Image (cartoon, rainbow, N blue to C red):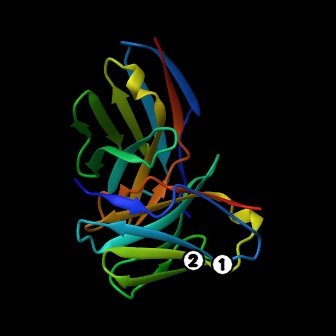
Amino acid sequence: GESVGLHLPTLSVQEGDNSIINCAYSNSASDYFIWYKQESGKGPQFIIDIRSNMDKRQGQRVTVLLNKTVKHLSLQIAATQPGDSAVYFCAENTGNQFYFGTGTSLTVIP
Amino acid sequence: DVKVTQSSRYLVKRTGEKVFLECVQDMDHENMFWYRQDPGLGLRLIYFSYDVKMKEKGDIPEGYSVSREKKERFSLILESASTNQTSMYLCASALSSYEQYFGPGTRLTVT
């Protein structure tokens, strides 16, 4: 199976600071990546995606960076808010299947 | 907005019982998926389906079966529930091989 992992299982940031969540993937053939946010007791919610022909993609307060050379994906959240507290995990698409990381728990300190 | 609903949020069943988990999506998506989510293991694919009456095994199909009689509905069946099937079960649907939309999950406890 694929290996999709996160560098840190937990992350605490002060409200207003920027957050960076990292993800490593192992299959260089993966061509599509997604970041999900999962709040306690809820299903994963799509945040942002990026295709392998891109290095960077920006959304509202979020940016995803893809470094194919080292097979690394990161999610940057600008001006982190208490509502951003959740588990974040990445997913890579290889063929027709997705493989998911185990997640990083982000806690925003007011 | 895409809506994926699951029949139960919480379910408690006894060992050996047959368990049905239902998932319905309202966006006419071809692809539907069943995952289980366990602490430290992330989401693991149980089964998926690309069309009505079609099904494919995922990474951990043992002990499970699925049914897709209608495009909008994908059911996960535990033929004889066991305690190691206690988990959070997540259903997802997708238009193609891209963004998956998840339901709220069913937390199943097998005693």
Q: Where is residue B55 in the image (x, y as percent from the top left)?
A: 44, 83
At 47% from the left and 64% from the top, the residue drawn is B7
Of B98 and A69, nearer the camera is: B98
Q: What element carries label 2?
A: strand
Check if mark 2's residue and mark 1's residue have beta carbons within 8 Å. yes
- Say whether residue A68 is visible: no
Q: Where is residue A37 in the image (x, y as percent from the top left)?
A: 41, 40
At 74% from the left and 63% from the top, the residue drawn is B84
Label 2 to label 1: alpha-carbon separation: 7 Å
Q: How crowded is mark 1: few (under 14 residues within 10 Å), some or many (20 or more)?
A: few
At 30% from the left and 65% from the top, the residue drawn is B94
Q: In this view, does A48 lie above or below A98?
A: above
Q: Position of residue B71 (x, y in %)?
A: 30, 79
Q: Taking A34 as reference, is B11 left or right?
A: right
Q: Mark 1 points at which residue?
A: B18
Q: What element carries label 1?
A: loop
Q: Name the residue under label 2.
A: B77
Q: In this view, does B44 lie above or below A47?
A: below
